[in-house]
Image (cartoon, grey):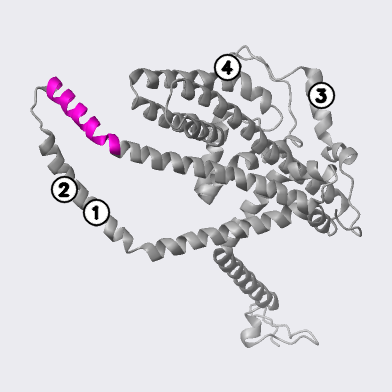
C-alpha cells in the first residue's frame, strides 16, 4: 500500500460480514411484510364493503326490527312483571300494534274511496258553479258543452295511461309480495329480539369485561327508555289530538270526521315541526267543500290547538321521554332520511334522543358568564349546581353501579 498521503486508503471488509448483492441489497425484509399486510387489509376491506352492499337490505330490516323491539319492550316488561310469559307478552303487544296500524289504514282507505266517489258525483254541480262564477267575474261566456268536450279529451288520455298501467300488473304484484316478505321478516326479527332480549343482552355481556358491560347496559337502558317513551308519549298525544279534532269536525258536520281526525292526530305527532300543517291541510280542504266558514273554523282550531299542545300539553307528557329542540328534531329527521330514506325519518328522533342522553353522562357543564349576547334568561345554573353536575359526571360508571350490576354470564335469560 502506498504511503502517499494523497492516495485513497481502502479498508478490507470486516471478518464474518458478507456484502449484500443483487435484489437483497435493495429490498429490506420488513418491506415485503408491510406490502403483504397492506394487501391483506385492502382485500378484507373490499370484501367487507362487498358484503355490506349485498346485505344492506337485510341490515336495514334488522335496524328497523331493533327499533321496534326497543319500542315494544317497556310494554312487554310490564306484562312480564304481571306474570305473563315473555313470549306471550311479546305476541300480545305485537298483535295490538298491528291491529292499530290496520285500523288506521282501513279507516283512511275508506275515507279516500268515499271522498273520491263523492267528488266525482259532485263534479257536475261544482263545474256549473265554477263556470257561473268565472262568467260573472271575468265577463266571459264559457259553456258547459265546451268544457265537457275538453274533459272528454282529457279522460281519453287518462284511459290510455290506465291501459298502460294495466300491463304492469305483474310488476306491481311482485312489489306487493316483496313488501309482504319484508314485513314478515321485520315481524319475525322483532319478536325474537324482544322475547329473547334478556338472553340476547346476557350473551353479549358474557364476552365483555365488567366495566364495558356496565356501559353497554347503560346504553341499552337509555335506548329502551327513550324509544319506548317516545312511541308511547307520541301515541298519547295523537289520541288526544284525534279526540279533540273529531269533536270539532263532528260538530261542524264535516264528512269523514273520524278519519280526518285520525289522520291529523297521527301526522301531527310522528312528523316533527311540519306534520301539523301537513295533517291539518286535508281537514281544511275537505271542510272547504262545505263552505268557507267551516274551513275557517277548522283552520283556526288547528292553529289554536297546536299552540295549546306545544306550550301546555306536550312539555308535561314528553318531559322525561324526548327533550329535543324542534330545530334539532327536524334536522335529525332530515339526516335520517338522507342516510336511510323513509325508515330514517322514524328512527332519527329516538336515536338522537338516546345519543343525547348517553353523551350527557360524559359532558361537564359549567356556570355561564354574564354577557348581553346570552340574554337575561337562565345563565346555566349556579356554581353549586355546576359543581354537583361536574362531580356526578366525573366518573359516569359510579352512578351505573347502583342500578346496573354485571350480569352472570353462566345464567340464562328470562
Nearer to us in this view, 276 or 378: 276
Mark 1 residue element: helix
Mark 4 residue element: helix
Gap between marks 4 and 2 measured at Cα: 64 Å
- Decide if residue 18 is on the left or right side of residue 207: left
Mark 3 residue element: helix
Report the residue marked by disc 1.
159
Nearer to us in this view, 59 or 244: 244
Evaluate if marks 1 and 3 touch, with contact meaning CB atoms under 8 Å apart.
no
Which dot marks residue 373? 4
Mark 2 neighbour class, 10 Å CA radius: few under 14, some 14 to 19, many 20 or more: few
Task: Magenta stretch: give its range.
Answer: 121-137
Query: Is residue 131 a member of the stretch shown in magenta?
Result: yes
Nearer to us in this view, 234 or 56: 234
Which dot marks residue 387? 3
Evaluate if marks 2 and 3 touch, with contact meaning CB atoms under 8 Å apart.
no
Question: In the rendered structure, which disc, 4 or 2, sits on the residue that comes first in sequence?
Answer: 2
Report the residue marked by disc 2.
153
Q: Name which residue lies at 49% across and 29% down.
A: 276
Gap between marks 1 and 3 measured at Cα: 73 Å
Residue 211, position as x, y percentages in the image: 86, 48
Which dot marks residue 290? none
Nearer to us in this view, 123 or 89: 123
Evaluate if marks 3 and 4 touch, with contact meaning CB atoms under 8 Å apart.
no
Q: Quadrant of the N terminus?
A: bottom right
Mark 4 neighbour class, 10 Å CA radius: few under 14, some 14 to 19, many 20 or more: few
Viewer-nearest of discs 1 and 3: 1
Gap between marks 2 and 3 measured at Cα: 77 Å
Amino acid at each position: 500500500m502506498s504511503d502517499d498521503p494523497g492516495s485513497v486508503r481502502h479498508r478490507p471488509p470486516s471478518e464474518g460480514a458478507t456484502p449484500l448483492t443483487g435484489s437483497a441489497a435493495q429490498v429490506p425484509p420488513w418491506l415485503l411484510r408491510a406490502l403483504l399486510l397492506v394487501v391483506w387489509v385492502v382485500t378484507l376491506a373490499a370484501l367487507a364493503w362487498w358484503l355490506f352492499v349485498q346485505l344492506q337490505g337485510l341490515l336495514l330490516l334488522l335496524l328497523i326490527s331493533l327499533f321496534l323491539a326497543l319500542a315494544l319492550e317497556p310494554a312487554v316488561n310490564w306484562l312480564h312483571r304481571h306474570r305473563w310469559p315473555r313470549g306471550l307478552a311479546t305476541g300480545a303487544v305485537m298483535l295490538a300494534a298491528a291491529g292499530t296500524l290496520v285500523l288506521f289504514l282501513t279507516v283512511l282507505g275508506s275515507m279516500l274511496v268515499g271522498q273520491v266517489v263523492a267528488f266525482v258525483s259532485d263534479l257536475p254541480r261544482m263545474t256549473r258553479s265554477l263556470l257561473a262564477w268565472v262568467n260573472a267575474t271575468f265577463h266571459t261566456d264559457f259553456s258547459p258543452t265546451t268544457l265537457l268536450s275538453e274533459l272528454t279529451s282529457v279522460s281519453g288520455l287518462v284511459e290510455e295511461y290506465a291501459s298502460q298501467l294495466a300491463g304492469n300488473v305483474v310488476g306491481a304484484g311482485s312489489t306487493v309480495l316483496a313488501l309482504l316478505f319484508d314485513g314478515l321478516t321485520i315481524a319475525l326479527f322483532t319478536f325474537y329480539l324482544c322475547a329473547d332480549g334478556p338472553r340476547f343482552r346476557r350473551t353479549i355481556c358474557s364476552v365483555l369485561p365488567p366495566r364495558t358491560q356496565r356501559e353497554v347496559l347503560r346504553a341499552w337502558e337509555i335506548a329502551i327508555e327513550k324509544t319506548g317513551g317516545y312511541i308511547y308519549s307520541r301515541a298519547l298525544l295523537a289520541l288526544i289530538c284525534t279526540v279533540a279534532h273529531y269533536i270539532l269536525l263532528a260538530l261542524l258536520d264535516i264528512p269523514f270526521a273520524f278519519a280526518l281526525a285520525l289522520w291529523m292526530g297521527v301526522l301531527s305527532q310522528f312528523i316533527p315541526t311540519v306534520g301539523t300543517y301537513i295533517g291539518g291541510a286535508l281537514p281544511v280542504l275537505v271542510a272547504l267543500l262545505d263552505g268557507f266558514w267551516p274551513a275557517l273554523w277548522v283552520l283556526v282550531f288547528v292553529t289554536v290547538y297546536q299552540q295549546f299542545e306545544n306550550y301546555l300539553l306536550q312539555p308535561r307528557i314528553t318531559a322525561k321521554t324526548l327533550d329535543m329542540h324542534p330545530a334539532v328534531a327536524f334536522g335529525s329527521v332530515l339526516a335520517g332520511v338522507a342516510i336511510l330514506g323513509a325508515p330514517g325519518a322514524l328512527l332519527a328522533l329516538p336515536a338522537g334522543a338516546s345519543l343525547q342522553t348517553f353523551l350527557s353522562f360524559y359532558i361537564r357543564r359549567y356556570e355561564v358568564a354574564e354577557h348581553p349576547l346570552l340574554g337575561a334568561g337562565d345563565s346555566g345554573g349556579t356554581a353549586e349546581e355546576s359543581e354537583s353536575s361536574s362531580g356526578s359526571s366525573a366518573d359516569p360508571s359510579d352512578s351505573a353501579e347502583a342500578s346496573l350490576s354485571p350480569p352472570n354470564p353462566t345464567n340464562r335469560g328470562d
